[in-house]
């Protein structure tokens, strides 16, 4: 097992019984409003990328730290039901996967760099319908392209990473056309920053964010 898979395996072993997205009792009683995670009101000059790589809490925070990223929103994509709730997605009845929508400045960061982060650092794209102890199609890896060029970038990146043998297995990420993104509930937005004490954040999400920080140190908004 290579170092990258060992890193993700360690995260899995530390996972708690509570799945990603399950609010702690205090959250359920008084869902806080987030300090991050809402789509920019002015999209002038911004491009959008949509990726699903397991629990959206870690994905949102990891991409938030990258230079050129204006905002990241947690939500759901890839399913059939309009306005799905977390509970419906978790029940596996809608076909959606936990997803992040990334609003970025293409003059600062390109789609290729975002794809590199997604496929090599933010999650394990070789795991089918799961990320560690989070099991089910709602945690599947998926990349939603908007243009033929984005599709080419995704497919070329997958081929390159597979050829590099960075993982012991082949990438199983779905590469599918973007159709619709539904923002998740308010309490999910910016959850990583609002709830650093949550056991899932400290034992699972933090390791994924730190992995991106180490792998793409030069691309961070703030140096480590």
Image (tube, rainbow, N blue to C red):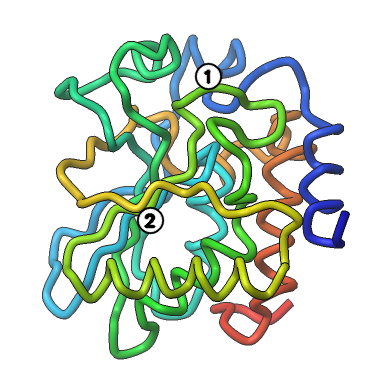
Q: Position of residue 194 (x, y in %)?
A: 56, 40
Q: Earlier in the sequence, mark 2 or mark 1?
A: 1
Look at 58% across and 51% down and name the residue there.
125
Label 2 Cα crowd, 10 Å radius (few <14 / some 14-19 / many 20+): many
Instruction: Give the foreground label among 2 and 1.
Output: 2
Disc 1 on helix, strand or loop?
Answer: helix
Residue found 72% across the figure and 59% down from its top: 167
Measured as percent of width and height from the top left, residue 87 is found at 40, 12
Dot 1 corresponds to which residue? 27
Q: Position of residue 216 (x, y in %)?
A: 64, 77
**3D distance between C-alphas at marks 2 and 1:** 21 Å
The residue where tag 2 is placed is 72
66 to the left or right of 174: right
Tell how many labels: 2
* Label 2: element kind: strand
Q: Which residue does the image show at 88% across and 54% down from the upper left? A: 1
Q: Nearer the viewer, residue 124 or 69?
A: 124
| Label 1: how many Cα within 10 Å (few below 14, some 14–19, many 20+) | few
In which image quadrant can residue 110 be found?
bottom left
Q: Check the image and report above or below for 92 versus 169.
A: above
Placement of 140 over or under 36, stated as above or below: above
Considering the image in quadrants, where does the C terminus appear?
Answer: bottom right
- In the shown orientation, is residue 31 left or right of residue 15? left
Image: 65 above or below 129: below
Tag of residue 96: none
Give residue 119's position: percent from left, percent from top.
55, 62
Residue depicted at x 76% and y 50%? 207
């Amino acid at each position: 097992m290579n170092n990258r898979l060992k890193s993700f395996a360690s995260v899995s072993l530390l996972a708690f019984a509570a799945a990603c997205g399950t609010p702690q009792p205090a959250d359920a009683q008084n869902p806080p409003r987030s300090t991050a995670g809402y789509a920019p009101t002015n999209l002038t000059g911004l491009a959008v990328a949509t990726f699903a790589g397991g629990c959206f809490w870690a994905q949102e925070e990891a991409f938030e730290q990258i230079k050129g990223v204006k905002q990241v929103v947690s939500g759901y994509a890839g399913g059939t039901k309009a306005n799905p709730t977390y509970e419906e997605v978790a029940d596996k009845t809608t076909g959606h996967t936990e997803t992040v929508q990334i609003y970025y400045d293409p003059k600062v960061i390109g789609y290729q760099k975002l794809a590199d982060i997604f496929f090599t650092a933010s999650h394990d794209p070789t795991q089918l319908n799961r990320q560690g102890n989070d099991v089910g199609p709602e945690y599947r890896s998926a990349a939603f392209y908007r243009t033929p060029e984005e599709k080419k970038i995704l497919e070329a990146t997958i081929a390159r990473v597979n050829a590099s043998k960075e993982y012991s297995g082949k990438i199983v990420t779905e590469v599918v056309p973007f159709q619709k993104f539904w923002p998740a509930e308010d309490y999910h937005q910016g959850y990583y920053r609002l709830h650093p004490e949550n056991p899932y954040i400290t034992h699972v999400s933090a390791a994924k964010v730190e992995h991106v920080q180490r792998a793409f140190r030069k691309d961070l908004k703030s140096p480590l």
